[in-house]
């Protein structure tokens, strides 16, 4: 009897490792072995596929891996660190992984610098755009999340499962990405009703389409040729065995427009851009908010974005994106409200279309509308949806949002058409 009980107990403990849903949730965080600092935007992916995730600002990640990949290798790579690899089956032996990555110091003698002029490096990257980026049609799956905070506390959450048809990274028009919303779920809204209409601006239509300045080659070239920026080579770092130029493009002080300082991460071998960071904080005084109702006043206090690209079949594709904005509101009585918005998305299952291949994406919302359509909430869909697990929640999201009810109850409540 005791032996039977022991066997049942062992089997019970093993159930999570056996993967009842035929997948393994690889969870953990990345830190520097030297400084213990979190490592953001690291790539965690299955070797030889377009399946992967990026660590968030805190170095945390979650990656649901289908059982068909259990015998494959998983790679982790981060700018400036030595890449590491694992057999996925071995990772299933523990539920959470604290991983320390060793820094890889760049030695100047290891590289013959072809173009030490930082402005020339950026020009070469823009000239090579059509060679390095995918400029033809491709489909992708994506999980999108937006959180909103008021006075330091999370006030609303939106999450979307969507599919997209991208008409190529050479296309910067607003309609350059068709989006099909598969499922949407929303929490309660705890924000002040006076400002509710604005916060929520950086929706998928915004961050995937022509308003996404990382994909607007025409604007980047225009700003480059107008010489509105000064360029400085910040450093050279490793990404896997590739060396990466890190070039800062700083908008000149005498340019009185809301333009973005840009940090380019450019691969030295072919001048492919592997990441772009944008920061508009120095030019926030030149933003011109329009359409503000009543006597409300608004001032944007922070704007930053990060776009990470990944090579698939020899071309660069969007892999992870993050857009942040903060606002100070003042009402007619002089009351002040500080609001923050954070949008992020992970992209997987990239499928390039042949010239005559018809896309299966059925856009169900205008790509000129920056809202999110209404839709019913299907708990079964989300239970089986693996991409939702790719981006872990911030530390206090659940605590702040579950003021009145659990998130599940809120999703059901706000899911009616």
Image (cartoon, rainbow, N blue to C red):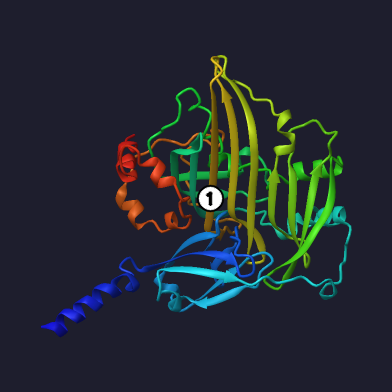
Q: Quadrant of the N terminus?
A: bottom left
Instruction: Spot the residue most to the bottom.
Output: 3
Residue 391 shown left or right of residue 41 in the figure: left
Secondary structure of residue under mark 1: strand
- In front of the other: 412 or 336: 336
Q: Can the viewer see residue 186?
A: no
Q: Position of residue 298 (x, y in %)?
A: 61, 25
Location of residue 354 with respect to 11 vertically, above or below: above
Q: In which quarter of the image is residue 156?
A: top left
- In front of the other: 157 or 115: 157
Q: Which residue is drawn at 83% across and 33% down?
A: 255
Q: Quadrant of residue 201?
A: top right
Mark 1 highlights which residue? 345
Q: Quadrant of the C terminus?
A: top left
Instruction: Spot the residue most to the front.
Output: 35
Q: Label 1 neighbourhood size at 10 Å, few (<14), some (14-19), many (20+)?
A: many
Q: Which residue is drawn at 68% across and 43% down?
A: 213
Q: Can the viewer see residue 45?
A: yes
How many numbered callouts?
1
Q: Which residue is drawn at 54% across and 44% down?
A: 343
Q: Position of residue 412 (x, y in %)?
A: 30, 41
Q: Where is residue 315 in the image (x, y as percent from the top left)?
A: 67, 62
Residue 36 shown left or right of residue 117 in the figure: left
Location of residue 284 with respect to 168 vertically, above or below: above
Location of residue 342 with respect to 195 vertically, above or below: below
Location of residue 322 with respect to 115 vertically, above or below: above
- In front of the other: 341 or 152: 152
């Amino acid at each position: 009897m005791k032996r039977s009980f022991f066997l049942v107990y062992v089997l019970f403990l093993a159930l999570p490792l056996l993967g009842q849903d035929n997948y393994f949730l690889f969870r953990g965080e990345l830190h520097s072995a030297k400084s213990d600092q979190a490592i953001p935007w690291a790539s965690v992916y299955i070797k030889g596929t377009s399946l992967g995730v990026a660590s968030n600002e805190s170095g945390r990640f979650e990656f649901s891996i289908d059982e068909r990949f259990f015998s494959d290798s998983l790679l982790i790579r981060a700018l400036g660190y030595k890449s590491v690899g694992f057999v996925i089956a071995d990772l299933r032996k523990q539920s959470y992984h604290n991983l320390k990555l060793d820094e890889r110091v760049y030695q100047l003698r290891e590289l013959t610098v072809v173009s030490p002029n930082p402005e020339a490096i950026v020009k070469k990257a823009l000239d090579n755009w059509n060679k390095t980026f995918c400029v033809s049609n491709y489909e992708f799956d994506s999980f999108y999340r937006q959180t909103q905070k008021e006075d330091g506390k999370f006030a609303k959450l939106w999450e979307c499962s969507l599919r997209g048809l991208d008409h190529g990274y050479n296309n910067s028009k607003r309609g350059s990405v068709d989006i099909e919303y598969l499922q949407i779920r929303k929490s309660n809204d705890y924000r002040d009703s006076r400002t509710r209409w604005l916060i929520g601006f950086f929706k998928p239509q915004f961050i995937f389409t022509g308003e996404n300045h990382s994909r607007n080659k025409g604007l980047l070239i225009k700003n480059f040729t107008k010489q509105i920026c000064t360029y400085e080579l910040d450093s050279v770092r490793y990404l896997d065995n590739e060396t990466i130029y890190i070039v800062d493009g700083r908008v000149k002080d005498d340019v009185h427009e809301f333009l973005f300082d840009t940090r380019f991460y450019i691969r030295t071998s072919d001048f492919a851009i592997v990441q772009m960071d944008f920061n508009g904080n120095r030019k926030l005084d030149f933003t011109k908010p329009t359409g503000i109702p009543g006597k409300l006043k608004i001032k944007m206090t922070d704007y930053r974005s990060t776009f990470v690209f990944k090579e698939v079949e020899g071309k660069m594709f969007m892999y992870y994106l993050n857009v942040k904005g903060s606002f100070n509101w003042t009402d007619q009585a002089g009351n002040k409200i500080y609001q923050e918005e954070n949008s992020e998305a992970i992209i997987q299952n990239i499928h390039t279309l042949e010239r005559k291949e018809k896309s299966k994406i059925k856009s169900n919302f205008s790509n000129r509308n920056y809202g999110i359509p209404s839709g019913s909430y299907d708990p079964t869909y989300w239970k089986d949806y693996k991409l939702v697990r790719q981006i872990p929640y911030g530390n206090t999201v659940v605590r702040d949002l579950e003021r009145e009810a659990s998130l599940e109850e809120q999703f059901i409540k706000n899911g009616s058409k």
